[in-house]
Amino acid sequence: MSRIEFQSRRQAGLAALYLGVFATIWFSVPAADQPLRALLAVASGAALVTAVVGAVVVARSRGTGDVARDRAADRRYLLIVLAEFAAAGLGAVVLSLAGWSEFIPVLICAVVGLHFFPLVPVLRDPRLWLLGAAMCVVALAGLVTALASAVSAGLVVGTGAGLLLLGYAVLALLSTAGQR
């Protein structure tokens, strides 16, 4: 298996920081009984530690001759994220007004998954295709599970999305090992 390589240590640190924070949030979505509740709390803590380590990597990469910032890419990134938040927020309001608030985590997970696709060229990271597709599969699994059983969509989606984001954040950090 080839080693995951990011454009820079800073980019890897930012990936770990952002995805670690969002993994922490996803792990807090499900309402679960013990022992799963304890496992989700541990996973949330691990994701938070991953985010902090990512922040340290970002801070240490300043002024190290890392790749120069691309202002146009930064603007595209911001527009994609704003569109993601707008779609998720509007969709959550519509689902809530329709009385289907239990499916809000499904919608948000699908929107998050879809937002990774236009980020591939912006961040020059083709692995985001896989992360995006996996997030969409988790959203679909949450929807199907909630419709076909008594298991909540939030449990499936929160756990699955949290694991995917934490896994990617950890891989980002591992890619910086041995780099200066």
Image: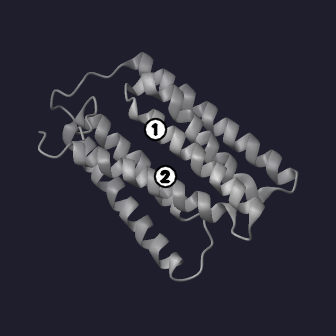
SS type, badge 2: helix
Tell me residue 36's x, y (percent).
52, 76
Identify the mark at residue 22; answer none if there is no mark: 2
Q: Assign the N terminus to one quadrant of the image.
A: top left
Colour mode?
one colour
Residue at horizontal 31 percent and vertical 35 percent from the top? 11
Q: In the displayed structure, does residue 79 sit left or right of residue 65?
A: right
Residue 116, placed above or below residue 41: above
Counting other residues with Cα less than 10 Å from the Cα at mark 1, is it few (<14), some (14-19), or many (20 or more)? Answer: few
Residue at horizontal 30 percent and vertical 39 percent from the top? 12
Q: Quadrant of residue 26?
A: bottom right
Find disc 1 in the rendering and name its residue. 130
Mark 1 in CB contact with mark 2 (< 8 angstroms): no
Q: In the displayed structure, does residue 145 sit left or right of residue 162?
A: right
Which of these two is toward me, 9 or 163? 163
Q: Amino acid at mark 1?
A: Leu
Tell me residue 93's x, y (percent).
79, 47
Which of these two is toward me, 159 or 173? 159
